[in-house]
Image (cartoon, rainbow, N blue to C red):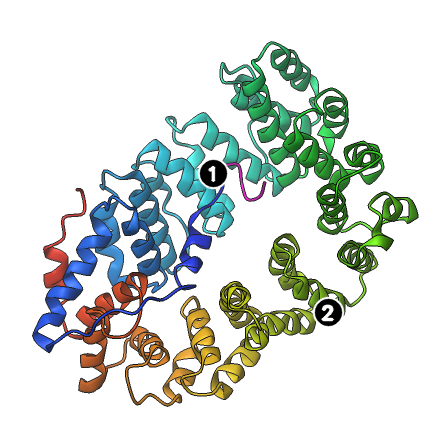
Amino acid sequence: MSGHIAIPLFRSAAAACFAVATLLPMAATADEFSPSATRHLEQAVQSQPDGSHLSRLSSLRLLRDPAMKDLFYKLLQHKDWLVQVHALLGLAEIEDDGRLDPWLVTQIDPMAREQAIANALDMELLDADTMLKILEWDHLESSNRLLLMAELQKQGRPIDEKILEGLANDNDLIIAAVASLLLARADDPGPLSNVSSRLSNASPSERNNVLQRLIEVIRIYEIAQATSWLDAMLDVENDDEDIAYWGTFTLMKLDPSVGRPHWNRLLGTSPSYRKRIMGALQFLEAGLAPDADARARVEADDDPLITLIMDTAEAVADDRTITTQVKELIDTGHPRVIDWTMRNARDLPADQAAEIYGYFIDLPETARRRSLEVAQRSQAISAMATLLEIAPEDALRRLREAEDDSMLQQTLLMGSLQSQHPELPATIASLRRIGSSRPDSLALLLLARKGDQLSPSDLQQLGRISAGGGQLNDTLQIQAAWLYLKHSDGLQAALVRLAPTD
């Protein structure tokens, strides 16, 4: 349970596009490049049965190319509401202020609007002034109104409590429940009691759905005023594993003394190994130092992984350097601790963060099993993208020093494709490119982004890549297609042929 009220989908999907590349045949002649490149764009704007048009649009958005403005405006009229989300976010990403256009938000499908607002908040494409502008629209859906009001309230901005009072009586129980939480944060706990009464009359499935959403809102928006309500609710609603786990975790974040009895009960007297792991992870995620009783309950002394998780949690709570423990956690390969590390390492001091993401990058070079290397290679790609944000000098140095045409160079280049760092083109230009290997193709894509004139040979090779001759998958070929048409002055002619509303 993470993100905003509507869970963002597209940032992680865009990053995942680059984790796997497939071999494809060479194109025959340069005359075929423009038609092939245009077909790639058509496949991005026309709905595909397998949904591949969405991954292509994610890839195009990563170019952050202002020349896409007209295309994105057309796609706002697309019949597929998910395409509308990409179009709206794409327009925001290429604007100088990097902000969602409040008027355009009102013009798209309601389903697209909810997803776009949630994604924009997660991606920091909405500031307070823009949110207030959207809230002025009389026809804004209640769910979106609540989401924006929650964000403004969290930022300390005044919100209209009269509107919340009306929404707290909404027929939709989720709407009423979330509005009641926001009122509780404004020191009006009364509506939460009404929610409890309504929940007692709801069906089991509806009750669980509402409770899951409420727990998520309390945690994300840190509504400490709901601690007592959540504490009492967990005393009654403890049969559902997800509700018990996330409700307990939320209380541990808000008030460890209130959450701890629920954690003890959740673990039980003879917990399974899975429960012991999850119990230890709750301390790590909450940033709490485990005491002797907590260590005993998860039987930390009997398992190296649990010991390591608890030791790391204690180091985090004490604000100690944790690079050694985190590297050991990474070495375990446990998906949950890997996920925690990737999310949280960037918040550490810069030197620690750079060391940890650098460790992710180096790890696949020593992998002994192919299955392990594939997962580690994907993690290394994400780590390189993050390293370019937090420690660009280190990232660019690694790129310069990587062995030519090696898997390491390919990994670093794929991570670089997710970055817009201004020094990246100069570093890429210094790399050796003598053929059509996958690293050479990736490097050419990065060079073509900066807008300078390409040499005739580079332009021809870019056309080959778009036609399948660069050993790249469809989500990268479409970048090559766009860049080839742009550099060959064929972009406007291609865009005229697109039919984005199918």
| 267 lies above or below 69 | above
| Residue 132 numbered mark, or none | 1
Residue plotted at (55% across, 20% down): 205
Q: Between disc 2 and disc 1, whose residue precedes?
A: 1
- Type of the residue with mark 1: Leu
Please identify the residue farthest to the top as the structure is shown: 201
Farthest left residue in view: 31
Q: Which residue is mark 2?
A: 323
Majority secondary structure in the magenta region: loop
Query: Where residue 372 sits in the image (x, y, percent)?
Result: 55, 65
Seen from the viewer's position, the closer of residues 71 and 296 is 296
Element marked by disc 1: helix
Q: In the current view of this chain or complex, which residue is farthest to the front?
A: 369
Region of the chain picked out in magenta, as a range: 1-6
Residue in the image at 20% along x and 60% along y: 40
Return the residue found at the far right.
292
Identify the element where label 2 is drawn: helix
Q: Looking at numbered disc 2 in the image, what kind of residue is underneath it?
A: Thr
Determine whether, in the image, residue 51 is placed left or right of residue 146.
left
- Seen at 59% across and 40% down, the residue is 1
Q: Position of residue 350 (x, y in %)?
A: 66, 71
x and y percentages locating residue 134 in the rendered image: 42, 37
Seen in the picture, residue 263 relative to 415 is either above or below; the reply is above
Q: Residues within 10 Å of mark 1 (few under 14, many from 20)?
A: some
Please tell me whether residue 4 belongs to the stretch shown in magenta. Answer: yes
Asked whether residue 443 is drawn in magenta, I would say no
